[in-house]
Amino acid sequence: MSAGQLILYVAADVLLLFGALYLWGSFNPQGQVLWTVAGLISIGLGLGLIWLGARHRRS
């Protein structure tokens, strides 16, 4: 695993964690609709980084 892949996976983990927390918090009675949007965007970006890291080939 190259350093680039490691950085992508760590960034994806952080985005997935915070995206899940935002999504979970949006269902709270004090939660806001914007939290749902931010959570879904963060989860999408995290999954995209995992996909990008899996496609990255060491040359």
Image (tube, rainbow, N blue to C red):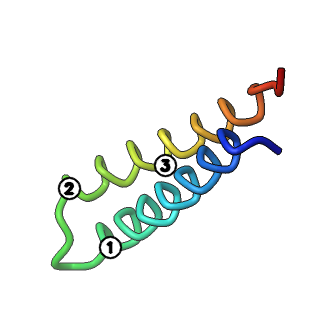
Q: Residues within 10 Å of mark 3 (few under 14, many from 20)?
A: many
Label 2: which secondary element = helix
Q: In percent of the image, x 60 and y 44: which residue is there?
A: 8
- Mark nearer the viewer, 1 or 3: 3
Query: Tag 1: residue type?
Result: Gly
Q: In percent of the image, x 49 and y 49: which residue is there?
A: 43
Query: Which of the 4 quarters of the picture holds residue 58?
Result: top right
Q: Earlier in the sequence, mark 1 or mark 2?
A: 1
Viewed as shown, does residue 26 lie left or right of 53? left
Query: Tag 3: residue type?
Result: Ile
Label 1: which secondary element = helix
As drawn, 46 above or below 54: below
Label 3: which secondary element = helix
Q: Residues within 10 Å of mark 2 (few under 14, many from 20)?
A: few
Residue 10 rendering spot, x and y as whole percentages: 59, 56
Q: Nearer the viewer, residue 24 or 53?
A: 53
Q: Earlier in the sequence, mark 1 or mark 3?
A: 1
Residue 51 disc label: none
Q: Residues within 10 Å of mark 1 (few under 14, many from 20)?
A: some
Query: Tag 2: residue type?
Result: Val
Residue 27 rendering spot, x and y as whole percentages: 32, 71
Q: Earlier in the sequence, mark 3 or mark 2?
A: 2
Residue 43 disc label: 3
Q: Name the residue that disc number 2 marks.
A: 33
Distance from the alpha carbon under mark 3 to that under mark 2: 16 Å
Q: Quadrant of the N terminus?
A: top right
Q: Name the residue that disc number 1 marks.
A: 25
Residue 11 rendering spot, x and y as whole percentages: 52, 52
- Mark nearer the viewer, 3 or 2: 3
Distance from the alpha carbon under mark 1 to that under mark 3: 14 Å
